[in-house]
Image: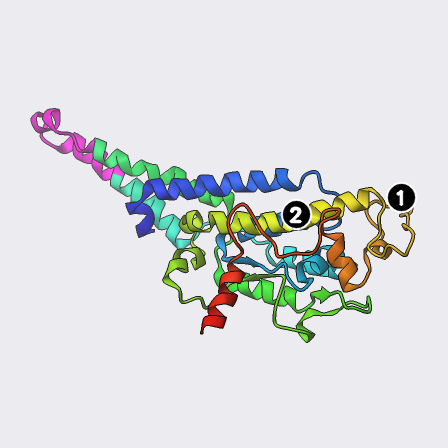
């Protein structure tokens, strides 16, 4: 709250970023028809206040997008993130602070010496505090997910039921192979450069803007390619024929979404593009720098 009082422009900037990001991601995924697209939009939007981390390597993210075994992962995480950030002590205190300060200013203008009031009326100074009202009300309308403990618990619970494709084609629990996860929240980073980014307070959204967009772009690319292949009736396993859904059902039949690890990864790559490290216009993947640091150590 003190940072908001001292930096009204920063608070307004972060609020506008949050609103525009929500509209942008909805448009970004609006043309995708692959299963779990709607859930992906809700989850990624909810993580605007979190140090979101995407791992596109080792078929983790591709398996999360493609495999029908991970439908429960998307659904469960949406449920665990479905809570509303309503009125809190800090919000009530901020609004009460503005109202009380303004009331005392107005009262003082009536009971003070009129000759002094003509030359200097501090009512204008008190009115400056009115900017807090639209900021606080705006955040309450946006309802950001700021409870760090709750967010980390939700992701951890969901990742316990995440599956990854295997060379044999039989999905297995990802935790049985490695602690690496496709979608996670960065934790325990002691680098001062990322202090603001790791803080879940809404005013720090300015620090998460580019990393969050990079993460969304990574997930969006896989949903886009998977939707294009499904539109062309191309199953994950090219040796099988496309299984058509019943006429009363819509979507992609689960049989069309099953395959080996290599097939699942290829299914999320643009046509004719070999498997390679993910690159983005927003800058290199931070995981690459982490790997270099580990080698240097």
Residue 67 makes an appearance in the image? no
Depth check, front residue: 129 or 177: 177
Regarding mark 1 in the picture, which secondary structure is present there? loop
Q: Residue at x 68, y 74 (%)?
A: 177
Q: Quadrant of residue 110?
A: top left
Classed neighbour count for the residue bearing mark 1: other residues with Cα under 10 Å, few (<14), some (14–19), many (≥20): few
The residue identified by callout 2 is 221
**Residue 28, x across and y down, in percent:** 63, 40
Magenta-colored stretch includes residue 119: yes
Tell me if residue 42 comes above or below residue 258 in the rendering: above
The residue identified by callout 1 is 248
Q: Residue at x 62, y 65 (%)?
A: 181
Q: Residue at x 44, y 66 (%)?
A: 189
Q: Residue at x 34, y 51 (%)?
A: 1
Q: Quadrant of residue 238?
A: bottom right
Quadrant for the C terminus in the image: bottom left
Magenta region: 102-123
Answer whether labels 2 and 1 touch (C-beta < 8 Å).
no
Tell me if residue 53 comes above or below residue 131 in the rendering: below
Magenta-colored stretch includes residue 199: no
Regarding mark 2 in the picture, which secondary structure is present there? helix
**Residue 94, x across and y down, in percent:** 34, 47
């Amino acid at each position: 709250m003190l940072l908001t009082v001292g930096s009204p422009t920063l608070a307004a900037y972060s609020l506008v970023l949050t609103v525009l990001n929500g509209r942008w991601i909805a448009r970004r995924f609006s043309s995708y028809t692959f299963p779990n697209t709607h859930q992906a939009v809700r989850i990624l939007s909810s993580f605007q206040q979190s140090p979101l981390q995407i791992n596109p390597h080792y078929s983790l993210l591709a398996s999360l997008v493609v495999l029908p075994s991970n439908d429960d992962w998307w659904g469960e995480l949406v449920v665990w993130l479905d809570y509303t950030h309503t009125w809190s002590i800090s919000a009530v205190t901020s609004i009460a602070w503005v109202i009380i300060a303004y009331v005392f200013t107005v009262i003082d203008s009536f009971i003070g010496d009129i000759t002094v009031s003509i030359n200097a009326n501090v009512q204008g100074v008190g009115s400056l505090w009115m900017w807090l009202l639209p900021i606080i009300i705006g955040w309450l309308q946006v309802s950001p997910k700021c409870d760090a403990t709750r967010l980390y618990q939700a992701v951890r619970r969901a990742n316990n039921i995440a599956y990854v494709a295997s060379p044999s084609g039989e999905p297995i629990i990802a935790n049985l192979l490695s602690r690496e996860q496709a979608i996670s929240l960065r934790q325990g980073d002691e680098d001062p450069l990322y202090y603001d980014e790791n803080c879940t307070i809404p005013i720090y959204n300015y620090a998460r803007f580019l990393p969050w967009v990079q993460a969304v772009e990574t997930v969006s690319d896989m949903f886009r390619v998977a939707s294009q292949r499904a539109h062309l009736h191309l199953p994950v396993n090219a040796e099988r024929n496309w299984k058509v859904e019943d006429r009363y059902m819509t979507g992609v039949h689960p049989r069309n979404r099953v395959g080996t690890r290599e097939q699942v990864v290829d299914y999320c790559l643009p046509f004719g593009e070999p498997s390679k490290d993910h690159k983005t216009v927003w800058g290199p993947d931070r995981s690459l720098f982490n790997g270099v640091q580990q080698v240097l150590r």
